[in-house]
Image (tube, helix red, strand yellow):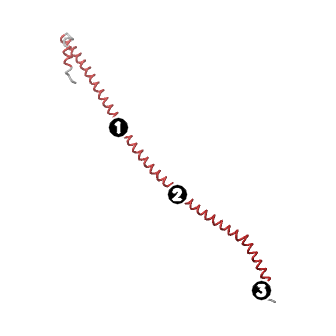
Amino acid sequence: MDTLIDLNSLIIQTINFAIVAFVLSRFFFKPYMKFLDEEAAKRKDLEEKLAKQTHILEEAHNQAANLVDQAKVDARIIAAEIVENSRKEGAEIVARANKDAELTRSKGFADIASERKEMEGEMKKRVIDVALALNAKIFGDSTSHREFLEAQSGEVKF
């Protein structure tokens, strides 16, 4: 009987196919699928880490930008304070200089007034001496009118 399908050959081929399928499934497909699943899990884990790191990087960049902006604002405030303090110190220096100038001026006027009084006293003394010398030449007596001249010299103003 020659049939198209040989039952012995079919059984052997079925067993061979089962063995090949089992070997492929056990030693190739399952490890390969496990490897692909592990790689997919690793890839997913790396993507999550990358997303977290990107988020952290963006936060760090935003914080750095905020720090730079705050530093600029602080620098402007400090510069304004320095300018204001400089103006105040300048005003204080000018006020002190004006006060010192006024004290020097007052002292100068006081010195001039005392010099003037000394000069007036000296002038009065010399005028009295000249008058007495003239009196001595004219009248022959130099002391006779000294008290009168000293008393009258207080009324004389220069």
User: Which residue is more in the foreground, 65 or 19?
Assistant: 19
Q: Amino acid at mark 2?
A: Glu
- Residue 95: give its label: 1
Q: Residues within 10 Å of mark 3 (few under 14, many from 20)?
A: few
Q: Which residue is mark 2?
A: 59
Q: Residue at x 46, y 52 (%)?
A: 70
Q: Residue at x 26, y 23 (%)?
A: 117
Q: In terms of secondary structure, where does tag 2 sit?
A: helix
Q: Which residue is mark 3?
A: 5
| Quadrant including the C terminus | top left
Find residue 43 and report its image quarter. bottom right
Q: Earlier in the sequence, mark 1 or mark 2?
A: 2
Q: Residue at x 25, y 22 (%)?
A: 120
Q: Amino acid at mark 1?
A: Ala
Q: Residues within 10 Å of mark 1 (few under 14, many from 20)?
A: few
Which is in the foreground here, disc 1 or disc 3? 3
User: Which residue is more in the foreground, 9 or 54?
Assistant: 9
Find residue 22 and report its image quarter. bottom right
